[in-house]
Structure formats: structure tokens, C-alpha cells
Image (cartoon, coloured by chain):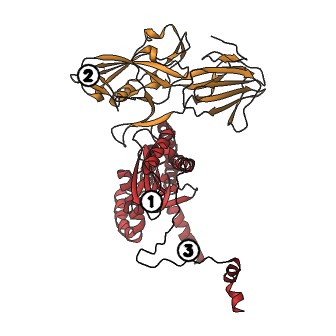
Amino acid sequence: MENNNEGRRDGVWAQPYSLASGQTQHHQLGHIRLWVTLLDQEWQIRSEALELDTDPASWTETIGHTLPSASVPLRRFIRENQSSTVTFLPALANLPTVIRPFQPLTIPPGGRCTIYVGTLVWMKVCAGDRQAVLTEIPLAAPSLTWVGRNTMEGELCYASPSFARLVLEAVPKRPWRAVTPVTLINRREEPLLLERFSLPTPLLSLHQNERGQLWTPGVTVEVETDMNSASLHVEQSLFAAAGACRHVADAREKMARGRLVRAFDRMFG
Amino acid sequence: MLETIETGVMKVFTDIAWGQWISSAFLVVLGLFLGSLAARSVGRFMAQRTSRHHTVMVRRLVFYVIVVLFFVAALREAGFSLDVVLGAAGILTVAIGFASQTSASNMISGLFLLVEKPFEIGDFIEVDATLGEVVGIDMLSVKLRTPDNLYVRIPNETLIKTRVVNRSRFPIRRLDLTVGIAYAEDVERVESLLLDLAEKNPVCLEEPKPFTLVTAFGPSSVDLQFSYWVPKDKVLEGRSGMMVAIKKTLDREGIEIPFPHTSVYAGSHSEPFRVQLLGPEQITEKDLPDVDKDS
């Protein structure tokens, strides 16, 4: 996995990196660049959003002594009990994410299909052995949207336009996006037109497979009578295609009964 | 003579049942103390569970109920019969009602405001020309804190009578910007540039969809309305950030945002204007200030 090329290595989630005082670790991942510096008394974190037209597929990390220009905003954190390790944990959005296929997809009556959707990952910078969270950075600019019956009732969600790929091989492997397999079951008499649906990202945990990809447990959506009465179910086990995985991050919210019912109402926007 | 006055005064003092008065005063003080204690603990209990508005309302209700109960008990202790007090209060109400019409109407308006609930504590409202965050809803007035940090007191009666705009009732808001472009520019291209900007701006919501309208052929520009939605707490940055982005993009694309100008046209039927170019010496002659000419 590691290719030593001028000290450049691939970054890994949930692996403690050890820094010496005065050293800076530079990351390039997704649409951001990040510098983590350890000093005698403090941690310094600088991050910069890049405006890219393409989606980079790699995460490179170098440890050195170079700092970016002073125009990059800096945040400082007090260093606790001389800890010198820094860990990067992935986390999914704290709001539900609306998946909107670029082209609408129709599921025939009685049919079922599995689509693979990628959602944006936030990076939690954690310091020390206790992994105290210093800050949280989205790995690309998240865009917001509104899901609800009208402009008075509803909730704010993140938006994620998706190709709604049906073949696993076609899903791009990016370390800064998590793949969720969504199984859609149409139990109605009429075809189901999938324009958009809300994925409860705060309820999903994150797992990493051997190739370094992030996966979430699968989600099953069953539509029985009406679009609005779809029932959503988060599976306990991981999708078989993900391969052997290790658990890297818990879901942000525990699954609560009331929360899930609300998610049903606004399933299909 | 002096002695009789003295004994008279003494008699007045000894006749007063001091014990009763002291115990009733004690009851009032106890009521105030217990009321504020209960209100505070109820407030603490509710603060984590409900909105600030409900907490303040229930806190106040608890305080007043306890204080009134103890006050009534204190009156009885002092020897007043409740019937007589209430009867006297009836007569008093008429007298006071005439004297303090404004306060009474404000109080009743306050009750209606509580029932109707057009805004809550913490909402951002607009009354007449005053904009501000509601910091208190009281018996006689509503207190606002304006964005430039002034404390504004608005009588409840005014709120009942005038138009009140609550800016934070709904979670999202639409912003409408007017963009004027020169007549020579391609309107459709500008429209697609604006929609691209809305897509790129992180504050802009994807849905409800942003849109553009051509609203008028103005005197010096084609006027476009550019509308997009933002979360209610991102209104300021949504507006100003977008305006800066529009100016930058239009400048980069070489699209003119015209300032008001007027073309003078003599018309085909009238004689052309006679235009004469002046030499430098004539210009200096013309530019001489009037004062110098007069002298």
C-alpha cells in the first residue's frame, strides 16, 4: 500500500501518525489540502479548499517542515499531556443526504435493484491516545438542499447528485467518499420513478475494506403503496461485495424509532 | 391637651394588631422568595427540554401564581375579607380603567399576542421600520435588540395594530437580487452564468431551484431578477457573497453592468445638433469663473 516516493505515502484512515515537535504533516485529499503541525504546547491545523473540476482519487500524505503561505487560515489547539499522535477518522454528514440521480431511473412493478451511491465524508482530526476531536473538515464543499412538502415544513439536507450506478465495478474508488449500497424494492402495481430520495447518513457507520475504500452498511427501501410511505431499513451486516472490512467510525446518531418514522415521510422528497 | 394627643397616638399604635401585620408581611416576602425559587427551578428543568419562549412563559406563570396565592393568604391574615377586597377591586377597576387606558389596552393586547403567538423569543422580526431579535415578551411591551445593538421597546398595542414581519418563522428564505445588464449583452448567457453561480455557492440551496426572470427593459439596462434560496441563518452572507460573485463573474466575462445614462436623440425630422470643437484658448475663456468676468 505504501509507495515511498520522496516521502509521499498514501494516507490511511484511523491510523495513528506520530509527529515530532516542529514537524508538519501535509495531506492532499478530496478537494482540500491540510497541514497539521505539532509544536511544544499546541497543535496547529491549516486547511485550504481547492477548486477542482475533477475528482482526485488519491490521498497523499508527507511529513516535513514546510508550512503553507500565511494566507491559509490557521486554527490552534492546546496540546494535552504531551501526546504526539494524530489520527484521522472519517465521519458521514450530520444531516440526511438527498441522493438525486442525474437521470431519473424507473423500477418496474415488483422489481428490485441495488444502486451504489457515494456520499461525502468529513475528516475528524483527533489528537492523542484518547483521540480527542480537534476539528472536523468536509473533504469537498457540501451543498445544501431542502426536502419537504412545501417551503414551510421540511428539513435541510445535504445534496449529493449521483450517477446511481448499478454495477459495482463502475463505482469510482475514492478515499474521501463512502459507498452505500441501496436496495430499492418496488412492491406496487405501477412502475416507480426514482427522482431523488433521502439517505439517513447520520445513522450509518463507516467501515474500511482491504483496498482502503469506505463502506457503510446497506440500506433497503421498500415502496409498498405510496412514495411517501416507503419503509427504510439499515442492515446490520455489511454488503458482501465490500470484502473483509474493519470498523472505523460509529454512526453519528443511534437509531431511534421516532427519527426513522420521520425519515419515511420524506423519503422521496 | 398634649397628654390627650399623646394617649390618642399611643392608642392608635397599640390598637393596631402588629402581630397580624408582621405575619402577613412575612407571608408576602415568603411568597416572593418561594415564587422566584420555584420559577427558577422550573426554568432550569424546562430549559433543556423546550424552546426559550416556552421556558420564559411557564417560569413567569409559576412565579405569578405563587405570589398571588401568598398575597391572598397575607390579606386574610391581616384581617381583610376576600369578598370585600374583590368588591373594592371592582370599583377600583372602573376608576383605574379610565385613568390608565393605555396600560390596560397594552395588557389585553399582550394577552392576545400570547394566544396568537406570531413570534417567539429569539425570532427576528420587523415592526414598522424596526428590525430586531425578540429578547422579551412582557405584559406591556415587547423588547427587541436591533442588529446594531440597540434596545427597542415596542408597546403590545402597536404590535396588535401594525404589520409584523417574522423573518425567522420558516427555516429557509428566498433572496431576490436585481441585476441590470447592458442592452448589447446576451441575456440568455447572463442567465446561465447566474444559475451556475447559484450552483457553486455553498450557501445556496439546490432545491427549491434558483431561477432568473427578465423583469423590465429599464431606462439604461435590461433588468433581471435572480432568485435563490438560503437557510434563514445564512441570509447576510448569502446576499453579499452572491453580489460579489456576480460582479466578479460579469467583469470577467466582459458583460457590462451599466450605470444610468441618457442618450439624447434629435429625431429624424429635426435638424441635426450643431457640434463645434473648441480650441484650447477658447476653453480657458469659457472656463473663467463668473466672479472674474464680473470684475
User: Do pointers 2 and 3 mark residues of a single chain?
Assistant: no
Above or below residue A46? Residue B80 is: below
- The reply to whether discs 2 and 3 touch (Cβ–Cβ < 8 Å) is no
Image hue for chain B:
red
Q: Is residue B240 above or below residue A122?
A: below
* Chain bearing mark 3: B
Residue highlighted by disc 2: A224
Q: Which mark is residue B74?
A: none
Residues B181 and B127: in front is: B181
Q: Where is mark 1, residue-wise?
A: B127
Image coordinates of residue B94 in percent, x first then y, are 35, 68
Q: Nearer the viewer, mark 1 or mark 2?
A: 2
Q: Colour of chain A?
A: orange
Q: Which residue is disc 3 drawn over?
A: B4
- Packing grade of label 3 (10 A; few <14, some 14-19, many >=20) is few
Q: Which percent across, then down, holds residue B77?
A: 44, 53
**Residue A96 in sight in this render:** no
Q: Amino acid at mark 3?
A: Thr
In front here: B68 or A228? A228
Q: State whether residue A4 appears in this view.
A: yes
Q: CA distance from mark 1 to mark 2?
A: 49 Å
Q: Please tell me which residue is depicted at 45% across the width and 51% down the height of the picture.
A: B186
- Residue B236: percent from left, percent from top: 53, 49
Q: Which corner quadrant of the image does residue B157 belong to?
A: bottom left
Q: Secondary structure at mark 1?
A: strand
Q: Give the residue type that dot 1 points to.
A: Val
Residue A189: quadrant of the picture: top left
